Image: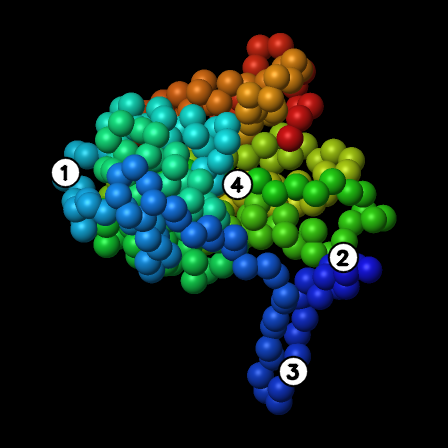
Amino acid sequence: MLQIIWKALKVQRRVAVGPVALNFQFTRAAPISRLRRLGLGRASRQHGRIEVSPMPARVDAVPGEQTALLFGVGPGLGEALVARLHAEGFRLGVVARNGERLQHLLDRLPGGERHRAYVGDVTMESSVDTVFSAWDADFGAAPTLVVYALQSFCPGTIADIEVPAFELGLRHNCFGAFLVARRACRAMGAAGRGTLLLVGSTSSLIGREAHLNLVAGKFGQRGMAQVLAREMWPQGVHVAHVMIDADIDEGRGETHPQSAPADIAETLLFLHRQPRTAWTSELDLRPWNERFWQHC
């Protein structure tokens, strides 16, 4: 019964008060964890970001230095991308709803104090703005690489899809990408350089049964990447869309065809390093033994 009531409350509502319309929706707050004492010092949460002392108050970006702001850092691809970019000398900002898990990820890296972990909810404009403002304060320059790699999916057919689930898919798979891309393009466009990678899936291109909650947002994200490429390439900003037509191996011992997250991370780094006379606008990836357009 409580689950039914909660689902009903999550539907977006509009109340007219004279000439003003108030939109509201009940949602759970981001599960920001209280940080424990970590190996690098006392951890605290301030202004939406996680700081570990002792460390410099500011991580200044120098000309030519590579920096990356990564949204959707979780098991599998996110952690592999962090490891790969760290090995290449990037200074990183990693973003997720659970800050404690992110901070432990950075603490496992030699020299991980060079990076920053930020708590953020990509479906909220104010939260995305807070993350970019914290980045500016910490690094002092626009990131050279921004990656948006979130996916939200609740399977269902048109007959049984619930409005909150459909809205959640749209907000994570497309609206959040818009909020992040807008701030990234403003910053990198002003700097005249940078790479924005939007990571999609099979549902970015193929509409399959029971995938409506995913395909609506992923189609939108792919279309947005095409628009942004045309707008931002002339400003020196490389925008590309990457479709992953595969399950990603997260170490669960599954035996069906999967892509290795480290190999996907290698491809994302390759896209960032492409010379501007031969940029890629869209790329699809799958393992050698995978049938085309089968997975998410």
| Inter-mark Cα distance, 2 to 3 | 28 Å
Residue farthest to the front, as pictured = 37
Q: Nearer the viewer, mark 4 or mark 2?
A: 2
Residue 281 in view = no
The amino acid beneath tag 2 is Gln
Q: In the rendered image, which quarter contains the C terminus?
A: top right
Callout 1: SS: loop
Q: Residue at x 59, y 87 (%)?
A: 19
The amino acid beneath tag 1 is Pro
Would you say the residues marked 1 and 4 are in contact, meaning their CB atoms lie under 8 Å apart?
no
Residue identifier under label 2: 3
Residue identifier under label 4: 150
How crowded pointer 2 is (Cα within 10 Å; few <14, some 14-19, many 20+) is rated as few
| Inter-mark Cα distance, 1 to 3 | 52 Å
Image position, residue 227 (x, y; %): 47, 45
Callout 3: SS: strand
In this rendering, position of residue 26 left or right of residue 281? right
Residue identifier under label 3: 16
| Inter-mark Cα distance, 1 to 4 | 30 Å
How crowded pointer 3 is (Cα within 10 Å; few <14, some 14-19, many 20+) is rated as few
Would you say the residues marked 1 and 2 are in contact, meaning their CB atoms lie under 8 Å apart?
no
Residue farthest to the bottom, as pictured = 18
Image position, residue 16 (x, y; %): 65, 82
| Inter-mark Cα distance, 4 to 3 | 34 Å
Pick whichever, 74 or 227, lies toward us. Answer: 74
Pick whichever, 31 or 222, lies toward us. Answer: 31
Image position, residue 172 (x, y; %): 56, 48
Q: Disc 1 or 3, which lies upstream in sequence? A: 3
Q: Disc 4 or 2, which lies upstream in sequence? A: 2
Would you say the residues marked 1 and 3 are in contact, meaning their CB atoms lie under 8 Å apart?
no
Q: Nearer the viewer, mark 1 or mark 2?
A: 2
Q: Nearer the viewer, mark 2 or mark 3?
A: 2
